Amino acid sequence: MKLDAALPPASLSQVPAIARAAESVGFDALWTTETQHDAFLPHTLIAEHTTRLRSGTGIAVSFARSPTSIAYQARDLAEQSGGRFILGMGTQVKAHIERRFGLEWPASVTGKLREQIQVIRALWDTWQTGAPLNFRGDYYKITLMSPFFNPGPLLPEIGALPIYIAGVGSGLAKLAGELCDGFLVHPFHTPRYLSEILLPAIAQGREKTGRADEVTISATVFAASSRKEREFCRQQVSFYASTPSYHAVMDLHGWSETAAQLSALAARGQWNEMPALISEDMMAEFVTEAAAPAALADALQKRYTGLAGRLALYIPFVPSEKDDFWRELAGAFNA
């Protein structure tokens, strides 16, 4: 099981030091989010200032971008990093696509994301092999690639560019099983939800297309080693549980009523009242707790063995904060 880290919201000037520190600590990969900053830009600096560390977008909002733009960015980052870049994409939710990005929400989320993946791979194939570009779907018609706009093939040693997608529901998990190299598990999950809902859906997708290769499961997890971190996790669980798109996780555990109450509080902007609705039983399902780094590593590995191949803590990696903790945690994973 690989231990990864999440890049904190940071200016680009801070990224080189964070990347070097992450590699020194022993993380396998550093993931960027798309909250306060662009998800792609840090990866040029991560690649430049490290030699071993992998990096990925976890996630880039695909519905806010053209698949052609994504294909160019991922190809160039793969080339610069020598094949250490992972393209991770997510759809975001309807309100953000319509009201934050000013774009149209698709009639079929799975249908549009499927086509985005297919377009990206069609472009990569054209650049790599010279095959004609002729993609025609319900959402995209991509047929033009003249030599002037063709960046050409990547060196063979770089290998195939991996695509991971993120999701909470079974539909996107099944799509990952059909088409993707990996699945990014949203932090709002439980081991039971992963085992009973997401992994079977991925297996269905693999069976549909007859794939023999495995899909890497990369999970961002809530973990706490202090009272402060525990209350932070409780707050975040209450926030995610209030989102109707994520209620399937609560429904599986019989917590539908609490989810509805949280949604009502969120609609009224009563954010401070929400954490109190997250019970100790809920915390036990969502959050892995241990004070000592080695104990936390052991608890996480026991909890996710057979469920995930990569783990990243929801708490971002910040150098100079908890340095000894991070080194001991990574050392326990790498032992």
Image (cartoon, helix red, strand yellow):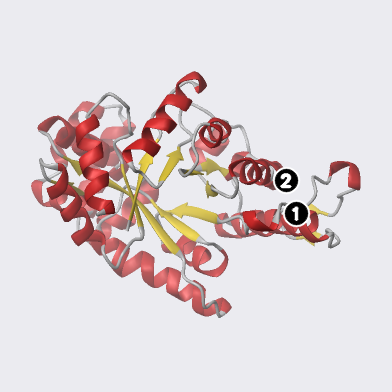
Side of 207 where 227 appears, left or right: left
Residue identified by numbered label 2: 68
Q: Residue at x 51, y 34 (%)?
A: 46
Q: Quadrant of the C terminus?
A: bottom left
Side of 51 where 332 appears, left or right: left
As rendered, which of 167 and 20 lies closer to the eye?
20
Local crowd size for mark 1, using a 10 Å CA cut-off: few (<14), some (14–19), many (≥20): many
Residue type, numbered disc 2: Thr
Q: Residue at x 51, y 55 (%)?
A: 164
Number of labels in the image equals: 2
Residue type, numbered disc 1: Leu
Local crowd size for mark 2, using a 10 Å CA cut-off: few (<14), some (14–19), many (≥20): some
Relative to 308, say whether 225 is above or below. Answer: above
Q: Quadrant of the N terminus?
A: bottom left
Q: Mark 2 near mark 1, Cβ–Cβ under 8 Å? A: yes
Q: Where is residue 310 shown, x and y percent of the image?
A: 36, 55
As rendered, which of 117 and 43 lies closer to the eye?
43
Question: To which quarter of the image does residue 111 belong?
Answer: bottom right
Q: Residue at x 40, y 28 (%)?
A: 18
Residue identified by numbered label 1: 123
Label 2 residue SS = helix
Q: Residue at x 12, y 49 (%)?
A: 295
Label 1 residue SS = helix
Q: Where is residue 102 shown, x and y percent of the image?
A: 61, 32
Tell me if residue 37 can be seen.
yes
Q: Residue 263 bears which disc, if any?
A: none
As rendered, which of 63 and 259 lies closer to the eye?
63
Q: Where is residue 57 shown, x and y percent of the image?
A: 51, 42
Side of 161 where 317 appears, left or right: left
Side of 254 where 98 appears, left or right: right
How far apart marks 2 and 1 lie (CA) works out to 7 Å
Relative to 275, say whether 189 is above or below. Answer: below
